[in-house]
Image: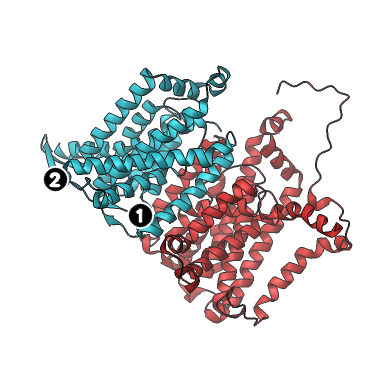
Chain colours: A red, B cyan
């Protein structure tokens, strides 16, 4: 802080984001279209009957596989939204599960207990969740750093208590609340229509990625990145950090609520585990594993985490693991043990997450090519 | 009247539990700036080690002197795990606060899963001396002995901690480090030894909370630490980070508030009031009741 720079020394040029550097390969011209191609491939997955033994239990277009994929996609979007807070603005919130849970329970309660049509319930829920995020954010953002993390954690705990204690008999307490499907559009109901839910989840993911991308590219996004790197400097520039942080917090909360609406439809109800602080912790794990502050890292991390969380249970009960000695097979049958360990290793050895893998492997690959 | 006395004493029992968890958290945060999510794991380790020792360790048992041995074993195990965590996981990430938080988050997920893998997800009956299941009549109120045991233990820990902080050389270093770590380092004192010590103390206190909490609740389960941890965080923030006395005051306030409101209001309302108290304290006095300003 006390260093004095002579005016002649030019500051080193700001690092240009990887996405903007012109590539040297012939794929350079096609790169902007890669996300579009990925979206198209993801959209036509339900038409394929490919059987991937070991990866999924049934063919790709079976309802079970599609539901798992849809959950993975929703969490990919949720992680991308959380990254708007953690990776791009540098806010460590431990209460993001609250807004997701508001989406899940809001939709469920309004449809099942209130008898509203789905579109009204969804609209009301998303509005309510965004307003909730704005209100709580306005209080929580009066603190910074670790205190902010604790306050958000406490607010989320209130949500968990409200749901678990079941005030007024609305939420169904610990048993959860199955969604009343009689009033829903028929295209979203039933095992045969799982494919529509899959597309809905895909649309949600695309929306979140688009919004986060646009926001982070806008002048506001640059201010947010500035807040992450040096909050005081933003203040010196005459911008109000509090307002920008509140915008990011509200936006992320609204996106999480929308994710909750989609998730509620996919799993057909609400259960109290979506309010737990563990969900926020796993969002944090997803983002860090994928690569905070990158466009595709959090999405990748979210999809992979949910996939592993579901599939490791099957892996843990497989013969290969059961034949191991007990001191190995028991921990390996716990998905959270494996994921938690991988996460700790990632913090030490892959600070940039999956998204940094390519730049890390780059020297290795060029060395091989030269040979 | 007897209801009020009963509620006060059970509230104090709860406060004792919170204090045992929060005192270590507060010291660790005040000195090393580590928000320790793995603190619930130390509690779980203490509870399970005590439970295991009571059944398997020669000389230990569920009654009389054997129980003391079992609890001592649990406390030792908790302290040992805490020291290992500090040396192996936290120390390499010195002064990188966010990464330290992330590592403790991963550790809390993996550690609880490991406990669950080893001893199952279901709650297990905790071995406890017969006299802890009985009640003592105090001014007409029948107070469970387990709660009284917790209060006595917490008062002893509080007294011991204060004496340690005030009258020993390491206590002096810790107090100075909480106040201004850079200055202590500049004077040529290795603060990192104090970090390890503080982790050991915190781990031991949390393990004691786990063992006595097992006696109080009658069962032990892997997730027990996590639910206590959130209230311990709230206690730490209200009390002011780095202050043992502040944690004690805050624990008493939180425990009593929770117990009284839960009894006279709807069940669960007390938990909400605690969070309300947190919000009020943060808005009026962000640094907590006592302690330095709670920033990153």
Mark seen at residue B134: 2
Mark 1 falls on what kind of element? helix
Residue A186 seen in render: no
| Quadrant of the image occupied by residue B79 | top left
> Where residue A135 is drawn, which disc sits there?
none
Q: Residue A187's spot in the image, x, y percent? A: 58, 78
The disc numbered 2 marks a residue on which chain?
B
Q: In which quadrant will I find the C terminus of chain B?
A: top right
Query: How far is mark 1 from mark 2, CA to CA?
Result: 29 Å
User: A120 or A28: which is nearer to us?
Assistant: A28
Nearest the eye: A293 or A201: A293
Please tell me the numbered disc located at residue A165.
1
Instruction: From the top left corner, tell me how far across and down residue A83 is, in percent.
Output: 63, 50
- Badge 1 density bin: few <14, some 14–19, many ≥20, Cα 10 Å: some
Q: Nearer the viewer, residue B188 or B106?
A: B188
In the rendered view, would you say A320 is above or below A331?
Answer: below
* Residue B94 locus on image (x, y percent): 57, 34
Q: Is residue A257 visible?
A: yes
Q: Answer yes or no: are tags 1 and 2 on the same subunit.
A: no
What residue lies at 71% left-to-right and 28% top-to-bottom?
A: A236
Q: Chain of mark 1?
A: A
Residue at the (48%, 62%) spot, across then down: A332
């Amino acid at each position: 802080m006390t260093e004095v720079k002579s005016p002649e020394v030019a500051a080193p040029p700001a690092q240009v984001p990887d996405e903007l550097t012109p590539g040297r390969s012939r794929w350079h011209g096609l790169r902007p279209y890669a996300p579009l191609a990925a979206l198209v491939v993801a959209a036509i997955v339900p038409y394929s009957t490919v059987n991937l033994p070991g990866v999924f239990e049934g063919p790709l277009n079976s309802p079970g596989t599609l539901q798992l994929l849809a959950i993975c996609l929703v969490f990919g979007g949720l992680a991308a939204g959380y990254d708007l807070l953690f990776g791009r603005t540098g806010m460590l919130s431990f209460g993001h599960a609250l807004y997701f849970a508001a989406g899940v329970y809001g939709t469920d309660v309004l449809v099942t207990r209130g008898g509203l049509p789905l579109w009204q319930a969804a609209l009301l829920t998303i509005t309510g969740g965004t307003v909730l995020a704005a209100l709580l954010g306005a209080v929580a953002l009066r603190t910074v750093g670790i205190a902010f993390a604790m306050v958000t954690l406490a607010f989320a705990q209130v949500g968990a208590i409200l749901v678990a204690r079941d005030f007024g008999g609305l939420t169904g307490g610990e048993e959860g609340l199955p969604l009343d499907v009689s009033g829903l559009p028929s295209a979203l109901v039933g095992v045969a229509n799982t494919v529509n839910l899959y597309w809905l989840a895909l649309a949600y993911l695309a929306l979140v990625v688009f919004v986060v991308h646009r926001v982070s590219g806008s002048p506001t996004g640059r201010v947010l990145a500035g807040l992450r790197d040096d909050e005081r400097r933003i203040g010196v520039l005459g911008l109000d950090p509090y307002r920008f942080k509140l915008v990011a917090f509200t936006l992320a909360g609204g996106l999480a609520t929308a994710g909750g609406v989609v998730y509620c439809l996919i799993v057909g109800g609400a259960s109290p585990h979506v309010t737990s602080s563990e969900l926020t912790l796993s969002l944090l794990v997803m983002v860090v594993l994928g690569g905070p502050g990158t466009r595709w890292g959090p999405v990748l991390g979210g999809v992979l985490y949910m996939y592993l969380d579901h599939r490791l249970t099957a892996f843990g009960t497989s013969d290969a693991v059961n034949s191991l000695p007990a001191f190995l097979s028991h921990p390996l049958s716990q998905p959270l043990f494996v994921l938690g360990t991988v996460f700790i290793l990632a913090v030490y050895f892959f600070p940039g997450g999956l998204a940094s893998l390519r730049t890390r492997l780059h020297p290795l690959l060029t060395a091989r090519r030269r040979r | 009247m007897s209801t009020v006395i009963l509620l006060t004493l059970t509230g104090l029992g709860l406060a004792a539990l919170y204090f045992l968890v929060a005192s270590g958290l507060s010291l660790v945060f005040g000195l090393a700036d580590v928000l320790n999510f793995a603190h619930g794991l130390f509690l779980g380790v203490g509870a399970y080690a005590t439970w295991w020792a009571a059944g398997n360790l020669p000389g230990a048992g569920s009654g009389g002197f054997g129980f003391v041995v079992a609890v001592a074993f649990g406390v030792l195990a908790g302290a040992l795990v805490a020291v290992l965590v500090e040396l192996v996981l936290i120390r390499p990430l010195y002064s990188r606060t966010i990464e330290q938080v992330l590592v403790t988050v991963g550790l809390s997920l993996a550690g609880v899963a490991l406990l669950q893998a080893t001893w199952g997800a279901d709650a297990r009956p905790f071995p406890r001396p017969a006299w802890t299941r009985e009640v003592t009549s105090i001014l007409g109120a029948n107070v469970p002995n387990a709660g009284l045991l917790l209060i006595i233990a917490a008062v002893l820990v509080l007294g011991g901690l204060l004496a340690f902080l005030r009258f020993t050389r390491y206590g002096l270093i810790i107090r100075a480090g909480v106040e201004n770590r850079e200055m202590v380092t500049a004077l040529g004192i290795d603060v990192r030894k104090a970090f390890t010590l503080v982790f050991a103390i915190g781990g031991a206190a949390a393990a004691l909370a786990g063992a006595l909490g097992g006696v109080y609740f009658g069962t032990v389960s892997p997730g027990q630490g996590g639910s206590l941890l959130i209230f311990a965080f709230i206690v730490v923030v209200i009390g002011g980070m780095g202050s043992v006395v502040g944690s004690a005051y805050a624990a008493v306030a939180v425990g009593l508030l929770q117990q009284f409101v839960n009894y006279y209001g709807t069940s669960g309302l007390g938990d909400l009031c605690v969070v309300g108290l947190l919000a009020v304290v943060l808005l009026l006095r962000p640094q907590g009741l006592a302690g330095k300003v709670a920033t990153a």
